[in-house]
Structure formats: structure tokens, C-alpha cells
Image (spheres, rainbow, N blue to C red):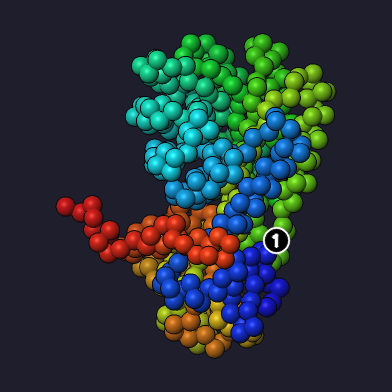
Amino acid sequence: MKDEIRICNNISENENGELMFAGVNTLELAKKYGTPLYVMDENRIREKCSAFRDAIAENFGDKGRILYASKACSFKRMYEIVGSEGLLIDVVSVGEIYTAVRAGFNMENAFFHSNNKTDSDIRYAIENKVGHFVVDNAEELDALNRIAPEYGIKQKIILRITPGIDPHTFEAVATGKVDSKFGSAIETGQAEEITAHALRMENLILEGFHCHVGSELFEAPVFIDTARIMLEFVADIKRSLGYSADFLDLGGGFGVKYIASQPTLDIKKTIGEIADFSKKYCKELGIEMPIVGFEPGRAIVADSGLTLYSVGTLKTIPGYKTYVSVDGGMTDNIRYALYKAEYTLAAAGRLNEKPDMKCSVVGKCCESGDIIQENILLPSSISRGDILACFTTGAYHYSMASNYNRIPRPAVVMIADKKDYVAVKRETLADITSLDI
Ligand SMILES: *Cc1c(COP(=O)(O)O)cnc(C)c1O
């Protein structure tokens, strides 16, 4: 097997040059469940949960929290898995709350995000006993303060603050800049304003602050810059408003390796460096260290997933390129269309053959941007019916899947201890019209 393919240790090859994932033969999975198919490695998900959990325990003791950002991959079984690993969760919509509740997740451990919570979203979250709201703006503060007493409660909240950091990542996933639809900026004074406003709200209990600067960060420096700005803000607020924040959520964005040339994130080292800095800086600022939270989404699930496709039409345009069409596309993987996201692909039955054909792998949707990856190398022997694997599709794939062109969404098959089981059924054609009158 080429090193370019071995991007995670759950990827291997058997003696026939066939792709094994989490110890199971992918060709057999494709035969048993059909394609396109999402396959997920439960052991790997649990490994990542415990890597974060251990790193936080080691560095922050009982003053650290890990929240799984469930938008990365949301279905009932995921909430069961992360719940059993002792993680808290982020939810961003009524649909995610509903799914978590149906999975039996303890909603006291849920944090409700979103930059636009309607009154009915707020009511639904309170009725389902969501532990914390991550309040984005003053309008939400007012609405929540007005609605909470209808339920006879005081709602715990943290405030989303914009630290003004540009993490030099994709524009669409950079969320910590001043000019952002999320949160209140420190730089404009709005962060302090909203804190003062929150402290005046009699039906809300302010527990601290939240920020999230971006995605695909592989090292500590951006997190440390963020921690510096946020801890300074905590100290400033203590001075100006006499309020000590108990909780500081530094967000998610931990990077994941999609292609061989990318680094592998060292979770323990990164969290260790952030912790060392934060402890030291709190002393300097003369403030008590708040409970620190992190919200990994991608880093928990991305490399626990792969997608299996069947190859269909192959088309060579002389002087241009070869197109390899697969039986899925932007309906199960929108990330190339959104961000030109990079992926590693392999012909699952031909790992012992040389990838000598330059080609673009495209989907079956009526959209020329329906591309999985351009200009990659696959063996020139591939043909109709072959199985192609696209790696690292555990995060932001199933959760972003659509029914464009009325294409049913793939099943999600989970592998635990080399045994496969269905976590989400394949959508049927009947499902496709189930809401039509
Ligand atoms: C998307 C998001 C996350 C998770 O980001 P990853 O890159 O998947 O780790 C965490 N927190 C917030 C507020 C987010 O919007």
C-alpha cells in the first residue's frame, strides 16, 4: 500500500490488495450494503473521545470540559457513543436537540448554539432542559430573559464573543474575525456591552464566555492567541464590571489529516501547550483560572469515516482529462463544491496496482461543480463496477448530505470491534416522496 493512502491507522490492505477499514474488508461492505455507503469506525471515535478527555484531565484536572460539536456528524448512535464516553455536546438546532433527546442524551450536558434562535427554538430547548444557551447577541438575551420565566426557570448561559482573530484558514470556516455573523466583538466594545446587559437580566445566569475562531488548526499558536485575548477580556470584565467568569469555552477547529502531506494533530501536546499558557497567563492577570472548554467536531469523527462508491462511466476527453463518475457526489459530499476540500481516494480492490491514471472523480448530480476530487491518480485498470473509497468523510458529510436530484442519502454503517452494524438506514425511494402531498 502506498504511504499516500495510509493517512489514518484504521486504513490497511489485505494480501489481495483489497482495502481494509477498521479491520473489515471494504469490498465486502460494499457488496453487503450497496453503495454509496458511509462507513464509520466506532473504536476510532471512542479513541478520539478519550484522547481529548485524557488530555483535558491531565492538563486542567476537573477544570476542563470537552464538548462534541455534534453538527459534524449527528444521528442517534453518535449521541449514544459520545454520551457513553462522558463528553458534553454542542447542538445548533431544534433538529439536533430532538435527535440527542431521542438518543437518551442527558440534555443538562448540552450547549445550544446558533446565531439566530427563534422564540420557538428557545422554547423547545428549555422544554427539553438544555443545560446552557450560548447566547449570540443582545436580541437573544432579551428573548431568553422574557421566555425563561414562563417555565419558572433561570436559564444558564454563556456569551459568544468574537476575539478578532483571523486563523488564515478558509474564508467560509473562519468565524472569529470582527466582521462575522457570530458573536459580539471585543474590539468594538460590544462584547463588554452585552456582558453588562446579561448581568442585568434577572432570569439568566451568566456563567462565562465562548469563542470559536475557525477550523483545521493543527497547532497550539492560534488557540494560544485566542486564549490570551479571551483571558484578557475576562480580566477586563472583572475590573470594569466586577464579574468573574467561571467558564471559558475556546471552541473547536482541531485539524484532521485529509491528505498525506498534511500533519497529524498531536491532541495531547496541543492541549498541554494551551493549558500551560493559560495557567501562566491567569497568574499574570491576577485572575482565577476559569473552567476551560473545547469543542472538537471534526477531530472526533472525521478520520473515523470513509465513503464507498461504485465506479460508473469513465470518459476520456482527448487532450483534456479523464472523468471517473461514481454513484454518489455532492449529495453525500458537498465539501469540494464548498471549499475545494482535499481528499485521498483509492481503488478499494486494486491497492497492489500502480495509480498511473490522472483523472477527476465526479458525482452523478446535474451540476458541473459536482466533483469529489480533481487531478488525482488511480490505476488505469479501473472500470465500471469497481469500488472507490474516499477517506476522512466522518465529519460534515452525512450531516451535510442532501436529496438534490432526489437522490436517496446513503446508509451509515458502523464498525465496532470488526463487526459491522447499521447506524443509519439507507433512504429509500419511498422516503423521497414521503412528505409530498
Ligand atoms: C463548527 C463549530 C465547532 C466545531 O468545529 P470543528 O472544526 O469541527 O472542530 C465548534 N464550535 C462551534 C461554535 C462551531 O461553530
Q: Report the side of 248 relative to 35 (left or right).
A: right
Residue at position x 60%, y 57% in the image:
43
Quadrant position of residue 259: bottom right
Q: Amino acid at mark 1?
A: Gln
Q: Position of residue 424 (x, y in %)?
A: 41, 57
Q: Is residue 291 above or below residue 330?
A: above
Query: Which residue appears at 45% of the width and 79% of the height?
Result: 311
Q: Residue furthest left?
A: 437
Residue visible at 69% across and 25% down in the picture: 290
Q: Is residue 197 above or below residue 349?
A: above
Answer whether residue 33 is visible to the viewer in this image.
yes
- Mark 1 vs ligand 1: CB below 8 Å: no
148 and 88: which one is in front?
88
Is residue 163 at least partly visible in the picture? no
Closer-to-camera residue (361/93): 93
- Which residue is labeled 1 in the image? 262
Residue 247 coordinates in the image, percent (x, y)? 64, 26
What residue do we see at 73% from left, 42% from top?
Answer: 55
The answer to whether residue 389 is above or below residue 218 is below
- In the figure, residue 233 lies in which quadrant? top right
Most foreground residue, 56 or 347 = 56
Q: Quick check: 34 above or below 15?
A: above
For the residue labelled by badge 1, is the local secondary structure a helix, a strand or a loop? loop
Q: Quadrant of the N terminus?
A: bottom right
- Tag 1: Cα neighbours inside 10 Å, few (<14), some, or many (≥20)? few
Q: Is residue 430 left or right of residue 175?
A: left
Q: Position of residue 44 (x, y in %)?
A: 62, 57
Count the numbered circles shown.
Answer: 1
- What x and y, as percent, mark residue 156? 52, 22
